[in-house]
Image (cartoon, grey):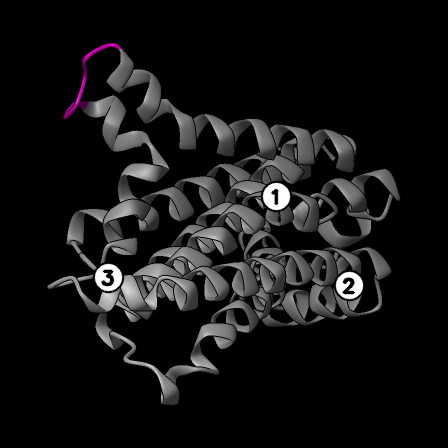
Amino acid sequence: MSARAVARLELKRLVVRPFAWTLAAVGLAWLAWQFLLLLDGFLKAQARLAAQPDAPGYTDLVAVPLLAAAAQVLLLVAPLLTMHALAGERRARTLPLLLACGQSPRAIVLGKYLGALPWLAGILLLAAAMPLALAPATHLDWGKFAAALLGVALMTAALAAIGVACSTFASHPALAAAAAFALTLALWAIDAGARAQGLDNGAINYLAMATHVQPLLRGLVGSVDLIYFALVVALALALATRRLAAERTRG
């Protein structure tokens, strides 16, 4: 069984799992409501904005804020979607069978990760389709929108990796979800705590996920932000692989 086969199996499990559909439906319904509220506020403010030079437009007032709202939804959805990745296998006592299939722990972890990504990406793409539906009738800043979408996509990839890692260490899916929630919230809020203590450009600020998402939401794509998310994904999957390899060695 290769990583591709594990990913395909994981994705099939999500497709037939009502919980995954419920998460997607609730998240997208809330995002649709937010889109209507943002659009209504933009339409009401058009007359006032037209009289201002360099006033924010559809991209700044509707499209990017909706992607920021999608990031908040994915902060909640990703831990719940990935909590069954390996903790569910452990609880169902099928993990020994998975470890005995002859595939390396690295391929198993990577397969679980790649199996969850399409579902999360689907939620993000459907959220992005809402402001895009009005693009022909508005002046959408494609560069800023693409940068914001890239930022939320990279954040989603990091959240999925953290969720799979927590599921690898946890004995129960609920514990995996709680650990992923706590870790992601800590990574998101650590920058606010550092700034409250007067630290604006230190190592702690670099560790905060918000520090690297916010520039992308503003349309600024920097290599330091891309490297950060790549490091988070690599570190989370490496820790998960090491934990699974140790469990396989113990038998």
Q: Distance between the residues labelled 2 and 3?
A: 36 Å
> Who is closer to the viewer here, 186 or 227?
186
Percent across and percent down for residue 87 are 74, 40
Percent across and percent down for residue 103 are 63, 59
Amino acid tagged 1: Leu
Q: Name the residue under label 1.
A: 76
- Crowd class of label 3 (few under 14; some 14 to 19; many from 20; radius 10 Å): some
Which label's residue is closer to the chain start, 2 or 3? Answer: 2
Viewer-nearest of labels 3 and 1? 3
Q: Mark 2 points at which residue?
A: 21
Q: Residue at x 45, y 59 (%)?
A: 41
> Who is closer to the viewer here, 64 or 37?
37
Residue furthest to the bottom in view is 136
- Crowd class of label 2 (few under 14; some 14 to 19; many from 20; radius 10 Å): some
Amino acid tagged 2: Trp
Please say whether residue 226 is one of the residues in the magenta stretch. Answer: no
Q: Residue at x 51, y 56 (%)?
A: 70
Which label's residue is closer to the chain start, 3 or 1? Answer: 3
- Crowd class of label 1 (few under 14; some 14 to 19; many from 20; radius 10 Å): some
Q: Which residue is drawn at 27% across and 67% down?
A: 57
Decide if residue 244 is in sight here: yes
Residue furthest to the top in view is 197
Q: Name the residue under label 3.
A: 56
Q: How far apart are marks 3 and 1 (CA)?
A: 29 Å
Which label's residue is closer to the chain start, 2 or 1? Answer: 2
**Element under disc 2:** helix
Percent across and percent down for residue 126 are 56, 72
Amino acid tagged 3: Pro
> Who is closer to the viewer here, 176 or 215?
215
Considering the image in quadrants, where does the N terminus appear? bottom right
Percent across and percent down for residue 106 are 53, 52
